Image (spheres, grey):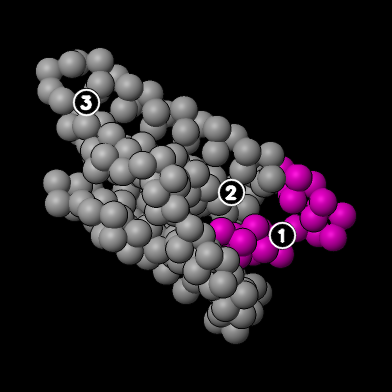
Amino acid sequence: MLLRPIIGLRWLNFFILQFINIGISFVLPILAQDYLNTEPFIAGLILLPGSLLGAAIAPLAGRLYDRRGIFLPLTIANVSMFLGCWLFYFGTPILSISSMVLIYVFLRVGFNFGFGNTLSDASRQVTIEEKADINSLFNTFQQYAGSIGTSVLSAIISSVQLRQDAASGLLTAQGSQIDFVLLAILAGIGLLTVFISQRLKRRYTSMKSST
């Protein structure tokens, strides 16, 4: 099924969104503890407002998909992830707990506009008999995205910390900035899949109308 263009693009976007979501949720508490010297409890709470607001946005995102189709919610999702990662990158030198919370809220709201809708739209591209297969396939890769995301981003931070040519907090910040650049690039790829799939859908529609 992943060889079908639309489904393959939806899967890639689904994977990227989850990679960024889990990965950045791993990086931010570490950055808060090592760089901002916050307590572990406070570092964990940084993610709470974004998670709660993101969950509240999910029904609205589904309604937007039902009314306007997949293009708008996926564009909002990937643009928010792209901008959010760059805000973290450029804002790291002046980062505070409050600014970290606000950027994460922005990023997490965007994530919820796209994540569930990506799977929903992919399910519409298959027959009823294939729906169970595509759901299990996407859910499996969701787990892979989370595990790979945390592994890759933690490895980057650890490799920077091994240099030991600066304070531990500063090295963590430098490693986190590399992570943010990587995640921003992935978000850009995710946005690209949205435009490619939209173009493919228009081509299919025009071909059907001409026959």
- Magenta-drawn segment: 114-137
Q: Residue at x 82, y 51 (%)?
A: 132
- Which residue does the numbered mark 2 point to in the structure image? 11
Residue drawn at x 87%, y 55% is 129
* Residue located at (57% from left, 66% from top): 55
Q: Which mark is residue 168?
A: 3
Mark 2: secondary structure: helix
Label drawn at residue 123: 1
Where in the figure is residue 196, as x and y percent of width and height? 45, 58
Q: Give the secondary structure at mark 1.
A: helix
Q: Amino acid at mark 3?
A: Ser
Magenta span includes 34: no
Question: What secondary structure is found at the residue carrying circle 3?
Answer: helix
Which disc, if any, is residue 136? none
Q: Is residue 103 visible?
A: no
Q: Position of residue 27 (x, y in %)?
A: 38, 39
Mark 2 → mark 3, Cα distance in angstroms: 38 Å
Residue 130 lies in magenta, yes or no? yes
Real-space Cα separation, disc 2 to disc 1, in angstroms: 11 Å
Identity, as a three-letter code, of the amino acid under mark 1: Ser
